[in-house]
């Protein structure tokens, strides 16, 4: 099975342009499946083997969302093997995906966002952290997109940034004056030299590119400092970005483009958020609610 996994991961990287994060997750899921199979060959995998694997995942108390993700990995894997002629029949055909519970995304109120954005100090580290928070909220980009930004990707005159999203798809995202102002202050204090265009926009202590985990630590630091909500992540600022746009009258299609969603269905979850907010206001204010 190892050679099949290697070929599949090469396909993801070369043909699909998948990110390192995606490839790593697929590798982890496929290794788990391989361990489950033991002596069973890939050619011998059928519908019943996959059903037993799903039962095994349920016994390990994985969430429905995690099981669905692992099943999606196997679908892609076996579809690739059939496409390249290694298998004649795709055993995942007709296999039902677990029905997912619809969890509403966690987001901050506008007042909570302001409190968070204004919490960093005014030294170099504080300016960098505030620039990170401002950029995440101003643009709604993903953490992976933020850490990939270089100085050449920021257009201070046009007020846009060039972002490389999932599948290395390029898009232009608007960025507000307040975020750009903080970025300028951070860059001035950073004192860049040499070929600055290729340097990372947000740097770590050794002037290298900040990692995903580094950004998460930044957000966690100021969430703890301001004592806002628990379980807030960098992605919560993306959720807040979308929710606040819809609350202020933005149309769903525009929000889809701003978030870089391939499908409108991915954006529609935010309509449920705004509906829940309306219901909450109604329940609190209507005399006969």
Image (cartoon, helix red, strand yellow):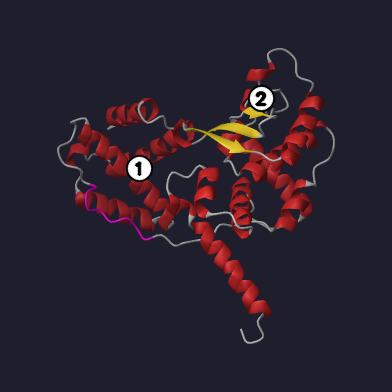
How far from the left and from the top, in percent, is residue 276?
Answer: 57, 68
| Residue at (55% x, 67% y) in the render | 275
Above or below, 142 against 201 in this view is: below
Q: Does the magenta stretch include residue 115?
A: no
**Furthest-top residue in view?**
194
Q: Which quadrant holds the N terminus?
A: top left
- Structural crowding at the residue carrying mark 2, measured as other residues with C-alpha within 10 Å and reported as few (<14), some (14–19) or many (≥20): some
Query: Marks 1/2: CA distance?
Result: 35 Å
Q: Nearer the viewer, residue 94 or 27?
A: 94
Q: In this view, does 270 lie to the left or right of 178?
A: left
| Residue at (55% x, 44% y) in the render | 258
Above or below, 175 against 265 in this view is: above
Residue range in magenta is 92-99
The residue wearing badge 1 is 73
The residue wearing badge 2 is 151
Q: Is residue 235 left or right of residue 114?
A: left
Q: Are marks 1 and 2 in contact (CB under 8 Å)?
A: no
Q: Is residue 173 left or right of residue 119?
A: left
Q: Label 2, secondary structure: give it.
A: helix
Q: Earlier in the sequence, mark 1 or mark 2?
A: 1
| Residue at (77% x, 30% y) in the render | 184
């Amino acid at each position: 099975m190892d050679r099949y996994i290697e070929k599949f991961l090469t396909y993801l990287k070369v043909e699909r342009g998948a990110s390192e994060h995606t490839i790593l997750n697929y590798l982890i899921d496929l290794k788990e499946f391989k361990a489950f199979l033991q002596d069973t060959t890939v050619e011998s995998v059928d519908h019943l083997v996959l059903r037993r694997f799903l039962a095994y995942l349920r016994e390990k108390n994985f969430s429905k969302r995690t099981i669905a993700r692992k099943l999606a990995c196997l679908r892609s894997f076996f579809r690739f093997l059939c496409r390249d002629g290694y298998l004649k029949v795709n055993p995942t055909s007709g296999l039902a995906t677990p029905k997912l519970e619809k969890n509403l995304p966690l987001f901050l109120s506008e007042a909570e966002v302001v409190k968070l954005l204004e919490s960093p100090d005014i030294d170099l580290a504080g300016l960098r952290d505030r620039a990170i928070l401002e950029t995440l909220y101003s643009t709604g980009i993903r953490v992976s997109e933020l850490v990939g930004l270089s100085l050449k990707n920021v257009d201070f005159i046009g007020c846009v940034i060039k972002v490389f999203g999932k599948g290395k798809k390029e898009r232009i995202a608007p960025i507000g004056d307040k975020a750009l102002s903080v970025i300028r202050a951070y860059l001035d204090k950073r004192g860049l030299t040499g070929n600055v265009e290729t340097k990372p926009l947000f740097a770590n202590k050794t002037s290298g590119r900040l990692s995903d985990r580094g950004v998460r630590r930044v957000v966690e630091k100021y969430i703890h400092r301001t004592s806002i909500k628990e379980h807030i992540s960098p992605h919560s600022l993306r959720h807040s970005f979308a929710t606040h746009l819809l609350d202020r009258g933005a149309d769903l299609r525009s929000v889809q483009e701003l978030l870089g969603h391939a499908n409108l269905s991915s954006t529609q979850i935010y309509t449920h958020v705004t509906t829940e907010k309306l219901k909450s206001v109604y329940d609190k204010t209507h005399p006969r609610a």
